[in-house]
Amino acid sequence: MDAAKRLNAENFVFFNPRDGYQSVLQRQFFRDMSHMAQLYRMAAQYRDKIGFRGQLLIQPKPADPRRHQYESDAMSTMHMLRHFGLDKHYKLYIKPAFARLTSRPYEHDVYMAAAYNMLGCVDASDSWPEFNGTSDICAQDMRDATLVMKCVLEQGGLQQGGFTLGGRVRRESTEPRDLFHGHIMAMDTFARALRNAARMISDGSFSRSIQQRYSSFKSGFGERVEMGNMTLDDCEDFVRKNGEPLHQSSRHEHYENMFNYYISPPRQ
Amino acid sequence: MDAAKRLNAENFVFFNPRDGYQSVLQRQFFRDMSHMAQLYRMAAQYRDKIGFRGQLLIQPKPADPRRHQYESDAMSTMHMLRHFGLDKHYKLYIKPAFARLTSRPYEHDVYMAAAYNMLGCVDASDSWPEFNGTSDICAQDMRDATLVMKCVLEQGGLQQGGFTLGGRVRRESTEPRDLFHGHIMAMDTFARALRNAARMISDGSFSRSIQQRYSSFKSGFGERVEMGNMTLDDCEDFVRKNGEPLHQSSRHEHYENMFNYYISPPRQ
Amino acid sequence: MDAAKRLNAENFVFFNPRDGYQSVLQRQFFRDMSHMAQLYRMAAQYRDKIGFRGQLLIQPKPADPRRHQYESDAMSTMHMLRHFGLDKHYKLYIKPAFARLTSRPYEHDVYMAAAYNMLGCVDASDSWPEFNGTSDICAQDMRDATLVMKCVLEQGGLQQGGFTLGGRVRRESTEPRDLFHGHIMAMDTFARALRNAARMISDGSFSRSIQQRYSSFKSGFGERVEMGNMTLDDCEDFVRKNGEPLHQSSRHEHYENMFNYYISPPRQ
Amino acid sequence: MDAAKRLNAENFVFFNPRDGYQSVLQRQFFRDMSHMAQLYRMAAQYRDKIGFRGQLLIQPKPADPRRHQYESDAMSTMHMLRHFGLDKHYKLYIKPAFARLTSRPYEHDVYMAAAYNMLGCVDASDSWPEFNGTSDICAQDMRDATLVMKCVLEQGGLQQGGFTLGGRVRRESTEPRDLFHGHIMAMDTFARALRNAARMISDGSFSRSIQQRYSSFKSGFGERVEMGNMTLDDCEDFVRKNGEPLHQSSRHEHYENMFNYYISPPRQ
């Protein structure tokens, strides 16, 4: 951390894939997690002591080399931070490819972290989507990357630092130019994704659709529920007076169609 | 909940597999989770109002029918509860088979919930271990079940309620006796597991091994770290004086061997 | 099959997800597969008897409802057909989404079936890529679909029939127009894929790169190996005279970059 | 192979995890597989030339380091061998843990290879069941191992060679005795499995149940179908005369219960 301060580092990452378990038989989970919390407490303290102004980040990973890593994903890590009172000092460094390891979409943990205002940094790499393992391929899927960029833009960007390029060329790509192609592909993928996401946001079609979808929370009964002022009895009264809410279609296919329009605009 | 009170129910379960998303494009995650929190707040309030004394439980599930369910697993659900100040009112109802859906061991969420003192109830069923899906087979693997029972015994049991039998016979098991065989198999599996776990605990070999493993936290520097009284500078001083800690083997294979001894004692 | 003949059906599909096993304890694999072969033999015989000219197809699926389905994927099914002497009468009806269930890429079984000249028909639907299950979403990923179309075009198309639309709208898409949007999205996805694939093929960049990659098999020693005229001793002599072959980069990243160019041409 | 001959090796294994593809864009599947067939043809020829009497084996693996390995599993490999006329010369060396990578049960490929009389050798190791990756743990699950041993015993054993121990201790098991514990655990697991399987077979309860299950193929119409003497018209006549066959329960839960009895006989 002294070195980070001297280098004016914007972020400082903790990545602890060995802090987990191989078997429930030989670990005490809560005790292990509280020990990690002690490290984080001390690190935050030390950062204040030396006046380092970088953002402390934790990078979750589900497993490997351990059978399970405690800081498994965004929600697990945020739970640990919150439980031990450390959430003010840390944010998450999300590698979207890791979400695939727990059978979640590429963009999932980016959105989860952002939902709790804990998204600090993103790794612009990928893993083969069909396989439960880290293949660390250079980012290539602009569709998935666009969803990531949309989330980042909507939260006003990443306050410190940015995206890191974490992919690796394949074992049998043995020439120096392969490394260039890999990095160019990853950068292009995320640059194109940024443009797509910016257009999606500025056109406003998604936000209009979503606002329309949540409109019942804007006023009246729905607003009061959202504010926390209602009881179950109030809900019952409402339904007795107004009947059950009409079910509205989520229009999933409509959203996906719109999305495809931005990913690949029609052409000749 | 009125019915639950009249029936003197020990537990009341919330299971919300439809509260999740199909696509990040058409949901506002935090808003959705805060709405769920409102429901829980109102439900806890209502329970107090009517004087229902059952334990409110939430059953996590990773996905299906949604692409992702917000209350995905133990840590996600506990994070939501803690974030919205509801963790005093709710515990978790863990279906171990669901952990397999996120590529975690059968017993994983039982241990995670218990680590945070949030384990309320357990579903004694299983899913085929190799497949990412809910097959709801009748519990049959005594090895996995033993790990679950060990955790339950070590936390002093389940305070209210107990285990539920949730398995289903296969589609092509068409006779009434098949249902009996399935339930008997599940009950035997968990009963044998209980016995194994009880023996493992009363023999003390695992707890001795674990205490030995964590012994450096029992006194001196390790104890002070655990208590939260140290700084990184203190750690540095310690290492300068005493050198780096000696790495000790985790003896994973030794633990697994011991475990197999309890699962299947030697015989002629 | 009589009905199929009267309707002038181009294809006739066998889809046997219940022919598999729940447990190795209660099945005789080879016997079961030979019984299926009898059904296929009799069906082919009946087709000839009534003069039905449609293509008999088998649709593989890895599992569900059984724990494993014998006709699990392209290679398993082709092995069964070849072993029982039925490969002249049957081709495969590939649902690419099913490849994801065995952790293979979407396009995998399309290419495998085509490699052995057994690709009869394709289902234009998808499943969420990260999850091991059939979610039957309407096809939306043009990148994956393009790889499928490239294979179909390169084999000269599908001789009889074509593509079937097999996706389903989501549970919460409850309006009739959602069904239209879903089908339009699937059709657009594959139509765009067809155009991309046609451009990729007519531009010739991929075929040039691949020919260059396999060039050592075009003449000399490589050609004789491919023709089946060499022995290990010949190989040894060749290496003694000429040294070990120089390793050439597979240039994977270059191919993926080119591919992205066709999927998403640069724009302002 | 000269060395193998001098050592009197019982088996000679081909393991080709690099023969596969990273992307369908840069390989010609059939051509690649035919090249592998040339290697196998030349190797079989050479074996005959030098008079090596060991069994030539191929070890399938689904993927890694490639995105997909051509010799992916038992059925894929057997299809390749049969297609290229090499099945007389080769058998399979099955590592059961690899079946988990394609979401199949541990014992699956052992049974598939044995079904086609192609099981040559077995690797007595395992991988964590919930995760799609090779963790190479020392075999520990006697239940899964028993299913493997039952298959091996029922085919009269492995003609040449035997089982290999392929597991690795965990990264944090750093003492020499850990290696002993790991190997002892694997050997015990398979030894116990052998005993369980021998008892299951000699007691005859499973074979009786299975014979009863397949009894309709023993005589009459069923026997003639199995012999390949029937047509669909014959089937139709049979049903018109005798009605639809009565559906019988597969009694899956009964079989699993019996199995558990052998894995863990009741005790005080």
Image (cartoon, coloured by chain):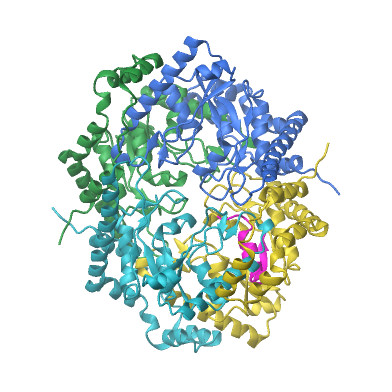
Chain colours: A blue, B green, C yellow, D cyan
Q: Nearer the viewer, residue A162 or C52?
A: A162
| Res A202 visible | yes
Residue D149, compared with residue A154, is above or below; it is: below
The structure residue drawn at horizontal position 16% and vertical position 39%, both measured from the top left corner, is B202
Position of residue D153 in the picture relative to residue D75 (left or right): left
Q: Position of residue D11 (x, y in %)?
A: 40, 70
Magenta highlight range: C104-124
Residue C122, magenta (yes or no): yes
Q: How many marks?
A: 0
Q: Nearer the viewer, residue B2 or D226?
A: D226
Q: Nearer the viewer, residue A2 or C151?
A: A2
Q: Position of residue A196 (x, y in %)?
A: 74, 35
Q: Nearer the viewer, residue C129 or D125?
A: D125
Residue C212, magenta (yes or no): no
Q: Position of residue B243 (x, y in %)?
A: 33, 23
The structure residue drawn at horizontal position 49% and vertical position 80%, both measured from the top left corner, is D49
Q: Quadrant of the N terminus of chain B?
A: top left
Location of residue C151 (image quadrant): bottom right
Residue A212, compared with residue D232, is above or below; it is: above
- Farthest residue, direction left: D268
